[in-house]
Amino acid sequence: MLANLLHIKGHVPGKEEEEEAVVRHTQNIARRWYSAVVLFVLASLLFYIHKSSFPFTKTPPVTDADFWTKDLALSTKTPYLLGHRSDVALPSGYELLQVQHLIRHGARYPNLGEIKGINRVYEILRPIVPKSWIIDDLINTSNAGLLAKSGEQEIAAIAERTVLRYHQVFDRAIIMPETLQFVSSDKQRTRVSAQTFRGVLSKDNTRLSQVRVLPQENDTTLSMHHICPTWIRDSAQLEQYEVALETLKFDVLNGPTILWMINVRLGVSKTTLLMDDIDIIYRLCGYDLSIYQDDSRWCTLLDHTMSEYLELRRDIAYSRLYGPYGANINKKIACVLLTDILKDIDSAMANPTTAVSTFRFGHAETMSFVSTLLKLEDTLGKDNAPITGNMSLSDAVDRGFKTTVIAPFSTNLVIELYRGRRRTGFFRLLLNERNTVWD
């Protein structure tokens, strides 16, 4: 073959030429192999640099003392204690007439769907993670969706601060207990949250009204989406197409790096985990913090930046199913609730001495629907563009719709009604006990 290659215009190579050709051919092969090895090394180096430059960093397990500055964004499983408490002084020169309080239930146990996912992750990682990471309470189906003890404590603490902040309202209720009303959706976690809140208030007033529970089949204000055919139809279509597409975009762009970082922190080279399993790990961190106040297990696999990416992945669906970037019904479904609130406000302005303050206990979806109706995403962020799977981290950080802010456990929205010197009405909106500028 080499002789054939050297035939040029009838030239027949001699023995020395053939030997030289063999040498050159061998050298060429060696050079190609050397080039391939160099390219492989360079590619590996670039891959390593890419991983190193990615915002995620490998961090050791955090301690109880430094976790609270770590500030993980854990979506709807975020503990309320993560920086949401803040006393707000009442404005001077105004008379407080009424408060309308909307509260999500406190920390709860995983629901049945989440338990299925947790069991799957437990089975994959059981040989890898310490035995103490496997919490049987979280996969006990008899606990599914129930309010945790820590959730009761969160609600009680909010109630105690509420009594101190709005003493004018509660002083009036001692004489007229009917001026305080309590309403709950028909779920154990909301009922117990409402009863816990009322229990704190009733220490000084045993004549308070009982909690009014709305049967789910008639609940148009706190669990409204379950009985709305339009929402059920539209959300099913969104979940099947748009949500699935944007989530796939996210997983293709960010999934390999996230999975790589999780494996690094687990101390293994490879696992069979998928992105839906990483979402379960993300939720487990939220449950560890919210229920057990323990950041030494699943939270050690995350850092702040990774939690923001995983919140973004969750918010792709949440913002479409319950928020401003989904079907038009999302912007209207809380109208009945807001109408009830406005009726109470109108009555308070007409008859200030008998103004009724109502405390309503709902769900993360309730908070999201109300936030959407009030367009809070415009107030809470610099960017209110729809959340997409290829959204940059800087745009994601600036977005207004974040479930970590809008719907953590025990999240609460308060509309305070004041009367000025000229008997004009004045509103102030508080989100998670913080003053919010409401456009």
Image: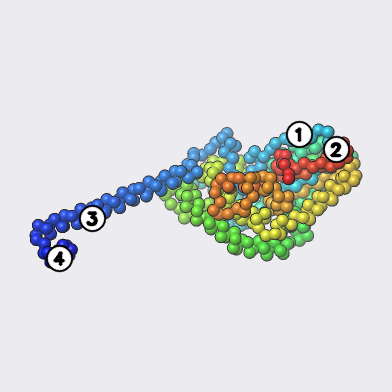
Cα distance between the residues tagged 4 and 2: 107 Å
Q: Residue at x 60, y 50 (%)?
A: 138
Picture residue at 81% right of the left edge, 52% below the top:
340
Q: How crowded is mark 3: few (under 14 residues within 10 Å), some or many (20 or more)?
A: few
Looking at the image, is 433 positioned above or below residue 6? above
C-alpha span from label 2 to label 1: 16 Å
Label 4: which residue? 9
Which residue is tagged 2? Answer: 420
As helix, strand or loop, the secondary structure at mark 3 comes to: helix
Q: In which quarter of the image is the C terminus?
A: top right
Residue at the image position 79 percent from the left and 50 percent from the top: 183
Of badges 3 and 4, nearer the viewer stands 4
Nearest-to-viewer mark from 4 and 2: 4
| Picture residue at 54% right of the left edge, 41% below the top | 296
Find the distance from the CA under tag 3 to the CA under tag 2. Answer: 90 Å
The answer to whether residue 188 shows anywhere in this view is no
Q: Is mark 4 on a helix, strand or loop?
A: loop
Image location of residue 75, percent across then percent down:
62, 48
Q: Name the residue under label 3.
A: 29
> Residue 153, position in %: x, y?
70, 41
Which of label 1 and label 3 is nearer to you?
Answer: 3
The span from disc 1 to disc 3 (Cα, nearest Å) is 80 Å
Which residue in the structure is indicated by mark 1? 89
Return the disc, 4 or 1, that comes first in the chain's sequence: 4
Q: How many marks?
A: 4
User: Of label 1 and label 3, which has the lower sequence position?
Assistant: 3
Q: In which quarter of the image is residue 119?
A: bottom right
Image height of 159 relative to 233, above or below: above
CA–CA distance in space, label 3 to label 4: 26 Å
Q: What is the secondary structure assignment of the residue under circle 1? A: loop
Q: Where is residue 279 in the image (x, y as percent from the top left)?
A: 55, 52
